[in-house]
């Protein structure tokens, strides 16, 4: 039962080729349409969201952050948001439910921040290992704790996104599998529950992409 339950996340092969991961980059085909189509309310809404994110990320990065730095995190937000929403449609592969994708996004970002910080701001990075006001006797322990918390950051970023995507899809799968064995009255309540859960999953898709981008921005601001 558990194998069948989690099999909804397995990539499937067509003619011996696994084309599921191509859905990750389908959003790139939609970006150029913004430039040659007449502005619609959806484009205006999307542009206002990106403008708001740009201002927020610029504030988080502080005065040391460059204007171009925010576009990295806005692109990251857009990529994750698109893939989260794609996974809500039937028969479309959910790439963000795999650590293969989420860890590929989180680990290079974290490594680049650490390498940049330790090379260019070595003294600041050492000072960051000991919070201000820490008693001298606790300093060795605080260094160990801060080091461990720093090292596990890419893992927590990746696992948080993956776990939230898997949890929602498993609930939808469980509710869908119980439908055929229920009466018509119960199926009505089941459909209402699935619609409510789908709305909740849409909110989770937006929130998790926002959380991933904001935490990446905060990690970047710490090394400046």
Image (cartoon, rainbow, N blue to C red):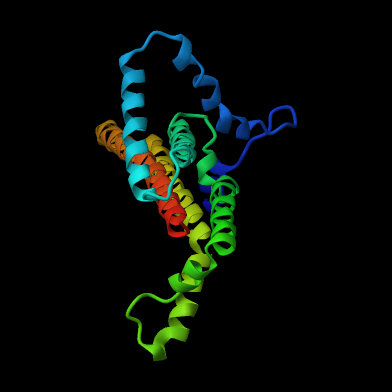
Q: Nearer the viewer, residue 4 or 96?
A: 96
- Disc tally is 0
Q: Is residue 138 left or right of residue 26?
A: left
Q: Is residue 25 above or below residue 159?
A: above
Please give the name of the residue rendered at 47% of the width and 67% of the height, measured from the top-left corner. Answer: 124
Residue 88: where, in percent of width, then height? Answer: 43, 33
Q: Nearer the viewer, residue 200 or 4?
A: 200
Q: Is residue 162 left or right of residue 13?
A: left
Q: Nearer the viewer, residue 69 or 80?
A: 69
Please say whether residue 36 is visible from this viewpoint: yes
Residue 114: where, in percent of width, then height? Answer: 55, 60
Please give the name of the residue rendered at 49% of the width and 21% of the height, measured from the top-left corner. Answer: 31
Residue farthest along the right direction in this orientation: 16
Q: Is residue 39 left or right of residue 25?
A: left
Residue 224: where, in percent of width, then height? Answer: 46, 56
Q: Quadrant of residue 160?
A: bottom left
Q: Quadrant of residue 9?
A: top right
Please say whether residue 167 is visible from this viewpoint: no
Please give the name of the residue rendered at 64% of the width and 35% of the height, measured from the top-left corner. Answer: 12
Q: Is residue 120 above or below residue 93?
A: below
Residue 56: where, in percent of width, then height? Answer: 32, 42
Q: Is residue 124 left or right of residue 208?
A: right
């Amino acid at each position: 039962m558990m194998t069948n339950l989690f099999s909804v996340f397995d990539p499937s092969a067509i003619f011996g080729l696994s084309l599921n991961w191509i859905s990750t980059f389908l959003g790139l085909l939609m970006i150029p349409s913004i430039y040659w189509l007449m502005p619609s309310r959806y484009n205006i809404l999307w542009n206002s969201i990106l403008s708001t994110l740009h201002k927020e990320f610029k504030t988080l990065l502080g005065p040391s952050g460059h204007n171009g730095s925010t576009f990295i995190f806005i692109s990251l937000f857009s990529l994750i948001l698109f893939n989260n929403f794609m996974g809500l449609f039937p028969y479309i592969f959910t790439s963000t439910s795999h650590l293969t994708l989420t860890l590929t996004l989180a680990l290079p970002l974290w490594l680049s921040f650490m390498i940049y910080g330790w090379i260019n701001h070595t003294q600041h990075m050492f000072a960051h290992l000991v919070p201000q006001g820490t008693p001298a006797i606790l300093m060795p322990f605080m260094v160990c704790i801060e080091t461990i918390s720093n090292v596990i950051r890419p893992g927590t970023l990746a696992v948080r996104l993956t776990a939230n995507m898997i949890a929602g899809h498993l609930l939808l799968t469980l509710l869908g599998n119980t439908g055929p064995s229920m009466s018509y009255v119960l199926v009505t309540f089941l459909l209402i529950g699935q619609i409510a859960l789908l709305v909740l999953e849409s909110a989770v898709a937006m929130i998790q992409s926002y959380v991933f981008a904001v935490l990446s921005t905060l990690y970047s601001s710490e090394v400046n």
